[in-house]
Amino acid sequence: MALLDWVSGHRDQMLDDLRTYVELESPSDDKESLNATLAWLGSWLDERLGEPGRLDRIDGGARGDVEVRDYPGRGDKPILLLCHYDTVWPLGTLAEIPFRIDGDRATGPGIFDMKSGLVQAVWALKALSDAGLDRPPIRLVLTGDEETGSIASRHVIEAEAAGTSAALVFEASADGAVKTARKGVGIFRVDATGIEAHAGLDPEKGCSAIDEIARVVLDLHGLTDLAKGTTVNVGILEGGTRTNVAAGRASAEVDVRVASQEEADRVDRALAELRPHDARATLTVSGEWNRPVMERTDTTVTLYERARVLAAELGVDLRECAVGGASDGNFVAPLGIPVLDGFGAVGDGAHARHEHISVRGMLERTALAAAVLHALN
């Protein structure tokens, strides 16, 4: 309870930090805004935690840069803290949804996903430092392209996770629950090529790519197995030129979610075995698994149980769940590292205009993060 009392005593400072951070708009597709946000984060982190023992900044190209900060602690293996600073909201959203505090509810673009999470992580470290409590070495990784698939940051995350003993991902919680499993995500595209011909005069000379892609949609949707946690969704269809022309081309863009590597392998086989109905047509599959499966492992369960006991001491019932959405934690779990995801904000409305957090939840989660990090040293 002493940690919660300390954190609660710094409520106003935490909210001031959160306000400044939320009011720095940082859409994933605006490099200038991302750079400005990361510059502020650097000075703020130095002010709150002191200069790191190691600081690396990796160029993200058109996407947000990655910053890695190592802070010394007791022991050899660091704990990995993952946070992203990009949001889905375009510039100007702040004018429509300003930062506001109304009782226990705080609102603003990106506050739930996931700006509050980083504020909580930093103040948890500060709480331990000010209280003179030990913790392991910390490796803080800040990424600026999570919302667009972590294309630039994935290899950095995987490299920096190597040698760490556990990972806490400060993504938003699921109604207060931490996430001990996440589905793997695949983004694929199927292109069909047919033969154009006049649909009325020469129908037999044509080969409809739309007919081919329609059959593919049925085949792909047939792969869905809800009992095994697999969903396959063709979300975008495109093709043809005119109603009186047999379509020469068509395409389908596909989202795949799987809860196990076995199911990922099954989907891979099905994609590889797609064949056109008409021998004159061709089918081409492109795309990849954007994020591997984050499976619920024994080591993750052990880490969760430890956190659950510490949460109970704070008067918090810490539940666990599995979700269909993915995060940067998906890159870490396959490396054999225990991962607790959703360690960030308590609230609701990710990617939605009612996005908000609970201020009380922010304080409790900050104290819990501090308690967990202290227990892991």
Image: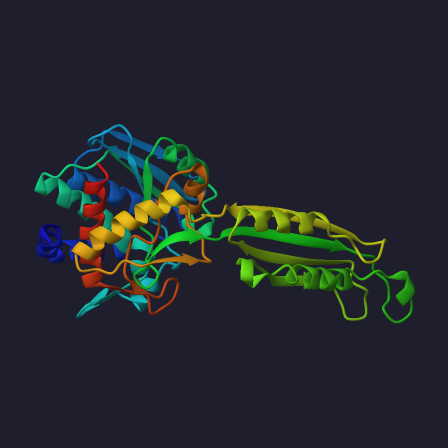
Please tell me in which quadrant of the rendered image residue 159 appears.
top left
- 44 vs 223, left or right, is left
- Image coordinates for residue 99, horizontal then vertical, percent: 24, 64
- 180 vs 194, left or right, is left
- Image coordinates for residue 53, horizontal then vertical, percent: 23, 29
- Residue 198 seen anywhere in this rendered image of the structure: yes
- Image coordinates for residue 245, horizontal then vertical, percent: 81, 66
Residue at 30% x, 47% y: name it: 37
> In the image shown, does 221 or 91 lie closer to the viewer?
221
- 241 vs 357, left or right, is right
- Image coordinates for residue 182, horizontal then vertical, percent: 44, 53
Location of the N terminus by quadrant is bottom left
Please tell me in which quadrant of the rendered image residue 365 appears.
bottom left
Query: What coloring was used for the rendering?
Result: rainbow
Location of the C terminus by quadrant is top left
- Residue 82 seen anywhere in this rendered image of the structure: no
> In the image shown, does 242 or 306 lie closer to the viewer?
306
- 140 vs 294, left or right, is left
Residue at 76% x, 68% y: name it: 242
> In the image shown, does 26 or 253 lie closer to the viewer?
253
Residue 80 against residue 237 in the figure, above or below: above
Figure disc tally: 0
